[in-house]
Amino acid sequence: MTAGLVARTRAFIRDVVIPAEPAWGETLAAEALAGLRAAAREAGVYAPHAPAAYGGLGLALPDWSPVFQEAGYSPIGPAVLNCMAPDEGNMRLLELVATDEQKERYLRPLVAGEIRSSFAMTEPHPGAGSDPAALATTARRVDGGWVIDGEKRFISGAEGAMFAIVMARTDAGDGHPAGATMLLTPLDADGVRIGPSIRTIEAAIAGGHPHVRFAGVFVPDADVLGAPGEGFRYAQVRLGPARLTHCMRWLGLARRAFDISLDRANARELFGARLADLGVAQALIADSAIDLATADAVIDAAARALEDDPRRGADLSAIAKVHCSEAVYRVIDRAVQLCGGDGVSSGLPLIQYLNEVRPFRIYDGSSETHRWAIARRAAKDRAREVAAGEPRRDVVDGGAR
Amino acid sequence: MTAGLVARTRAFIRDVVIPAEPAWGETLAAEALAGLRAAAREAGVYAPHAPAAYGGLGLALPDWSPVFQEAGYSPIGPAVLNCMAPDEGNMRLLELVATDEQKERYLRPLVAGEIRSSFAMTEPHPGAGSDPAALATTARRVDGGWVIDGEKRFISGAEGAMFAIVMARTDAGDGHPAGATMLLTPLDADGVRIGPSIRTIEAAIAGGHPHVRFAGVFVPDADVLGAPGEGFRYAQVRLGPARLTHCMRWLGLARRAFDISLDRANARELFGARLADLGVAQALIADSAIDLATADAVIDAAARALEDDPRRGADLSAIAKVHCSEAVYRVIDRAVQLCGGDGVSSGLPLIQYLNEVRPFRIYDGSSETHRWAIARRAAKDRAREVAAGEPRRDVVDGGAR
Amino acid sequence: MTAGLVARTRAFIRDVVIPAEPAWGETLAAEALAGLRAAAREAGVYAPHAPAAYGGLGLALPDWSPVFQEAGYSPIGPAVLNCMAPDEGNMRLLELVATDEQKERYLRPLVAGEIRSSFAMTEPHPGAGSDPAALATTARRVDGGWVIDGEKRFISGAEGAMFAIVMARTDAGDGHPAGATMLLTPLDADGVRIGPSIRTIEAAIAGGHPHVRFAGVFVPDADVLGAPGEGFRYAQVRLGPARLTHCMRWLGLARRAFDISLDRANARELFGARLADLGVAQALIADSAIDLATADAVIDAAARALEDDPRRGADLSAIAKVHCSEAVYRVIDRAVQLCGGDGVSSGLPLIQYLNEVRPFRIYDGSSETHRWAIARRAAKDRAREVAAGEPRRDVVDGGAR
Amino acid sequence: MTAGLVARTRAFIRDVVIPAEPAWGETLAAEALAGLRAAAREAGVYAPHAPAAYGGLGLALPDWSPVFQEAGYSPIGPAVLNCMAPDEGNMRLLELVATDEQKERYLRPLVAGEIRSSFAMTEPHPGAGSDPAALATTARRVDGGWVIDGEKRFISGAEGAMFAIVMARTDAGDGHPAGATMLLTPLDADGVRIGPSIRTIEAAIAGGHPHVRFAGVFVPDADVLGAPGEGFRYAQVRLGPARLTHCMRWLGLARRAFDISLDRANARELFGARLADLGVAQALIADSAIDLATADAVIDAAARALEDDPRRGADLSAIAKVHCSEAVYRVIDRAVQLCGGDGVSSGLPLIQYLNEVRPFRIYDGSSETHRWAIARRAAKDRAREVAAGEPRRDVVDGGAR
């Protein structure tokens, strides 16, 4: 089934979506998006990742990558197929954690594209930024529900979203530990204030990245997502795949940039040779081919691991995130170089693509934060092996010192 | 004298220019620029590179770097000091090649900031792009002058410029060889058509980067710059230093980005430590410090060589161009990483700076074109040494094979 | 089954093989090797890749990687398990192409470890080096067989090998095209002369890397491997997996180096902190973890592709070769840095490991040769898509130019 | 004068020294070295850096680089010219700090090549390794002198050296502070025990890198070098230039490797083209040319700064050390790639050169230790500027957040 869906998605993106892409500096109008989504449904490519019972195609996570890459070949492809962040990650979280009743109210219209959603975790300094443990927003137990107070920032998609999944710190209560709790919070609730959007360099995510303030916002018990106090665990459930789907989508855009640059290199004559035959161009092309193939392979490995062995899946998805976000950036950057002046101007969309993917090296954990965590995990895992009886290799393998 | 000028420029940029910087997406108004230039004259920092006889400070090329770096600390600094491309390179070329009469008409008002200028060499494919030998624009000898026909592209600063120095292919004539000739061409001359500007990602150069078409444009003999047929030689005279001054200015902007990121790293707490004390941040900071120092050193080496040994100066300025354009990009890119979400949004100017310097890896010869030329030169220089008697080391140093 | 074999191999290498590793500068004695192989057979880990009918464990190619990585954790592990180059690649080629009678004579004793073998393709300049098409060694048709004339170089393992698979250029004949032919050639045949071994920096391959000269060497028809004229095709059959198994084995050694460096980093105090907690060390550790994971993933992807889609498998195995050979080198190089003085001395085996893997960036196609081929293939594949109707993206995606 | 000395040194190295280089694995015999030194004296190129009054040529530090680079073009060149570590750094320290009487006894015979010397600072873990503050060796005040107790490791050149400059921790005493003190210690003194040499991967430094133990070794007051308690300051005086001279010498060897690879690339045909014309080779060549030029430039900048502004000189020499040690390694590594199989075998000396320079990324402060220090210094310097009134740029330059 996947191969067919990949082919259909590929054809749909190239035949229907790319011709509808907005010009530089413009965004896709709501009606145009609705029309494209209708066409996607008709073509049998809509919401590939969402559960079939709620309007999607029910694809299993290890099969998402080739489909999402085809979708990402157009910057608006994921929005058209309704598999863009943050909605896509919220759909998965709802699928895995929400009650049936919550699924009807939140998941079904989300898959249908009738509403948009948001994920409200990040906070202004010194709250939960790179360090989730610093969570400052609270939800206080009250009769029949919870009252949220706090401030969030970089809340992607919040403008125009129907609801947000809000992470808040909660005390221990009857049967649940102290920790973080996720609350399904309509953004038109009393006490919610959406600030002015921050202007960022990318444009692909509808609804901006505004600050959102919660002042005494009441959320009834029925809108608690999963068990109270388990929010950090759910955040991991969401984040692993959400990181990977970013990798998949942007890898698709990197393939687009690579194709643009190959077409240029195949056509352009320079110093009496085809650009594609000039060695310094070949070095760029080869490095990009290697980046694309290794990114693809590590996404696959991480997606399989997320299903088979969640701990290893979390490790690998972090590694995949760092590698892919940097590989994707390099591929587009090299395409810019190969296309010269057109690469940095409106002559080609490449510099826009470069700006689209630049923030991915920062959001969902910056490359540096992940590297720090990856190193600590590697050192700890090894220390555990040694504690369990493995000999210290630097001692055993040591010679006469 | 240089140390005093550096200090004055530093103070002027920080006290006067930075507060006048336009907001994201806006450009400096003409009157504001005029006011700032008047202030610069008053402060004794205006046109440091231009000859004293024509209104500048007459600094020698090997001393430009620290002053230009201070100017470049603000994206509008070089424009305020009137040492921005393409005018700055044109001033130097006029100083070295123009007649006294031409200097009065073109150089004096250019230094004064009364007019702007342009340098028209690059052509649409398959003309003179990376490969100047493909020059397609012609200047035909006619009575009392020359008639230019051809099309140029990416003519930075052409909108609103009073004149352009046009490179055109010319036949051999009385006493001069076939080759390229430079012609001082007023852009309001009959037959000049300035096309719509190309939208590029950077904004620092006034006057855009439009196409310019020349259809039967007459230029009198008095406006030929230097000797006919010597255009390629003059282009080298201009390009070596012009490449270097780009390096100097953008290195200044990289220092600004570095300071922004250091201030953030010194102030921000993360995971219970100062960001500046976290190792993955330290690795970024150290690599940028190394990039800044090596860029500075190679600019100095190239500037000294350009005065002492033009051939070596040309080689070194090409190497400096590649190293600095890439180092400057990396430094700003790392500053973006260190500043997280603010780095890719209007929260800080870093992502704008990154876009400002991105084209520098392409214009004035892309990194790849230069690498190709550098490699060929290295191989040829060595072949010449071997031809002159040096033993082939791969043979002499070879062991039992 | 694979998981069990991986665990057994892991235990065997650590418990039995590592304690038997020779000291720096020494090599494993033949009797010691024989004893270790007997132990490997007993432990059920011997010749994992070889067909069960001929004495191996019959593992399928996509399952080799984790086992070979465990074997490669010791520099002598692959020799002990008899899955080292060049024998391992020759076994596979014999399995796929040889006649039953040839398998009895060559494959069975090879798997048993009774003989060693060699693969004689590379020639002195200007013959078949990086460019196999330049094959200069010939095999001339004679009555009942062929006569080989030519010279080969870097014939790994030739000293002491019982036979070599010799690639020779052959004319078209009855029913077979002109091309290359593979001949099973006993190295004690008349006319074979094995030259002095070239001293290389690595030591893992038994039998050195000598020149081998063939002067009128007769090979009977029964020892032609596969069909005459098909040698280049068989070479591809051998090379794809052979490249990958090098990646697998050396990746295992890189894991050893990584463990050594982690044990040191976990134990060593520096500037008042554990080395593993110092950021610049963390950056090295994280980059190595990323290299190990992406290398592992791309090996897996290539191994699966080699079974499912040979053309894609060939592409991916070339990419895997470049990525892994460089990643493995970087990982060991970083381990050297983490261990300071011990890293470059006999205090630890790391600098030996570094020298062991250095040639892998050159043999089986250097990184540069592969990059060149990868770039050409990428450009050609894309040109083929465009020829088949895909729009030229640099034209279609182009804006107003 | 320098230009002439550079040319003479160049000629001497090529005509006299290179033909005398020992084969792989062998070292220069003492008599051969003595003969070459006599020839060097005759040629007027001996001991260029040493003070003229003590037998050298008295070159000023900013002029050393081109001469040392010529010397380093042969791995034995610096030993022949007697400007190799550790003697060269000791000569400079003696010149700057020693008494006249000490100069006669230690400096004069050292310059003459009659004796060798050593510098004993590094200690076994957890003593003074990367972190000099951990100095564990002590010198106790006794009547008429000091008594040293402690252990040193990696004491380059100690075997056969006449004396070592020993760093030892000392208490405060009459007029001098607590700190480190340098003591000129004959290595045949009672209580000195030189351990077995550690086998390292490089071979250029005569006298190995053994452990040296000091058990109650008496040193009279006359052999204290400089003032007691000032050892760390003198260590800095020694280390800045000593790091730089390593850069200079190894940069010379990198040029040799570059020449070997260029000669090969100019001569070798591959795939129907000269290797030097193949693009992936050109990319390697260009990157090496850039590395050589930037390394040269930053050495010059650091050498000038060491004379003009010691603090800036110390900063720049650390940056130069990191950049040059890594650039030199990359240049030789690329030369290995360009020469294929010969690059990793005794066919060419390149892999030996690679092993010679590998430890330089570790000794005199590893790249990681220096990066850590460079980052801390950059952050502190900037914090000091801000404390002195510079506005915090991340605040002032911040937009609407």
Image (cartoon, coloured by chain):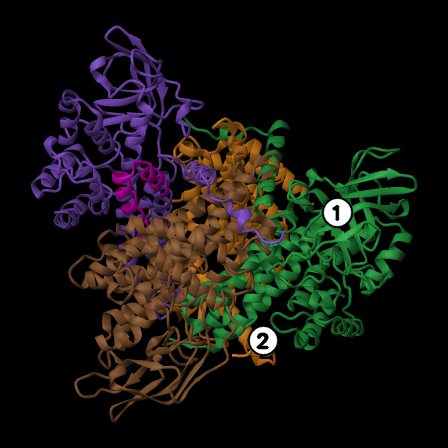
Chain colours: A purple, B orange, C brown, D green
Indicate the amino acid at tag 2.
Asp
Quarter of the view holding residue C126: bottom left
**Relative to C193, is A18 on the left or the right?**
left
Numbered disc 2: secondary structure: loop
Badge number at residue B66: none
Seen at 23% across and 25% down, the residue is A160
- Chain ID for label 1? D
Kindly check if marks 1 and 2 are in contact, taking CB atoms under 8 A apart as contact.
Answer: no
Look at the image and say whether residue A299 sits in the magenta stretch. Answer: yes
**Relative to D314, is A78 on the left or the right?**
left
- Chain ID for label 2? B
Q: Residue farthest to the left?
A: A42
The residue at which mark 1 appears reads as D237
Residue D53 in the image, given as x and y percentages of width and height: 87, 60
Numbered disc 1: secondary structure: helix
Residue A42 in the image, given as x and y percentages of width and height: 7, 41
> Would residue B283 be seen by someone viewing this image from the given angle?
no
Q: Residue farthest to the bottom?
A: C143
The residue at which mark 2 appears reads as B397
Q: Main secondary structure of the magenta part?
A: helix
Q: Residues within 10 Å of mark 2 (few under 14, many from 20)?
A: some
Quarter of the view holding residue A304: top left
Q: Are marks 1 and 2 on the same chain?
A: no
Q: Nearer the viewer, residue D64 or D191?
A: D191
**Relative to B254, is C237 on the left or the right?**
left
Range of magenta residues: A293-319
